[in-house]
Amino acid sequence: MKRTNDIRWYEELDSTNNEALRKIDSLDNLSVVAAVYQTAGRGQRGNVWKSGKGENLTFSVILKFRLPDMETGSASGLFRPLPAAEQFAISEAVTLALCSFLGKYGIDARIKWPNDIYVGNGKISGMLVENSLSGSYVRASVAGIGLNVNQSSFPADLPNPVSMTGITGLKYDISRMLEDFAGHLSCELSCLDDPDRTALRNRYERMMYRIGEETLFADISGREAFLPANSVMSGQEGGNPLFKGRILGISGTGLLRILLPDGCVREAGFKEIAYVIG
């Protein structure tokens, strides 16, 4: 099935995810909402996404899925039914699209679980996925993406940002890049129509940041934890218990699987641990 993207640019929005959610019923599958500037860009778990005006890509992609009781003909433009238990496949597909897209520009990127994109130890892209469920299936999803493109100076409170121009020294045409990425993403998302997502999972795990390496984590699941989920701690433990482990991959539901020094395997949600970097 051929799918095309309807890209809608706005000079200013509070958040592209907010706008996509406001208009989701009137927009087609794979529609894109993009903004030159966001006044209240949102990241994971209530974090703020900060981006220089007109310097980066900030956009949201709408994904719509058939439900099991829908007639195929009347819902031919939608992805096949996606069980809620398998919704992490959305993050897998979009993050892989980002990595391969950056690779076209000579940038070697990796996926920092669950859905940040890193180049070395620097964050170049983040994503906020908001799903709407109908019973035990995903009805629709909005994947909000921020990609640092031309920005060369960042706020001091961002621990480790990098941008495409900071890596390559080149400047990029933002709107042309979005058109290119949207088409690229549409192709990558075709895997959501495959009921067997083993290949998708394997590709995601191969691209994971620090896969197989000994990594220092902070346990932020207890009452003493104060950091945002999956935050970068930059070497400051802040009173949160630390532990080491090797990333094995992810579970069937998208939990991070960590091999501990005692041989046990811990499965953690991103509200429970933070990477210590630096």
Image (spheres, grey):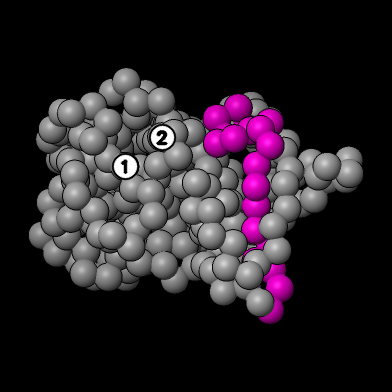
- The quarter of the displayed image where residue 164 is located: top left
Reading the image, the residue beneath label 1 is: 162
Q: Residue at x 68, y 37 (%)?
A: 214
Q: Is residue 192 left or right of residue 267?
A: left
Tell me where residue 221 appears, x and y as whole percent: 69, 68
Reading the image, the residue beneath label 2 is: 119
Depth order, front residue of 122/65: 122
Cβ atoms at labels 2 and 1 below 8 Å apart: yes
Sort mark 1 into few (<14), some (14-19) or many (20+) by Cα contacts within 10 Å. many
Task: Please name the amino acid that badge 2 sits on.
Answer: Val
In which quadrant of the rendered image does the N terminus lie? top left
**In the rendered structure, which segment of residues is drawn in magenta?**
205-223
Whether residue 115 is situated above or below residue 142 in the rendered picture = above
Whether residue 170 is situated above or below residue 27 in the rendered picture = above
- Determine if residue 265 is in view: yes
Per the image, label 1 sits on a secondary structure element best described as loop
Tell me where residue 138 appears, x and y as whole percent: 57, 57
Instruction: Assess whether residue 206 is covered by the magenta stretch.
Output: yes
Q: Residue at x 47, y 62 (%)?
A: 44
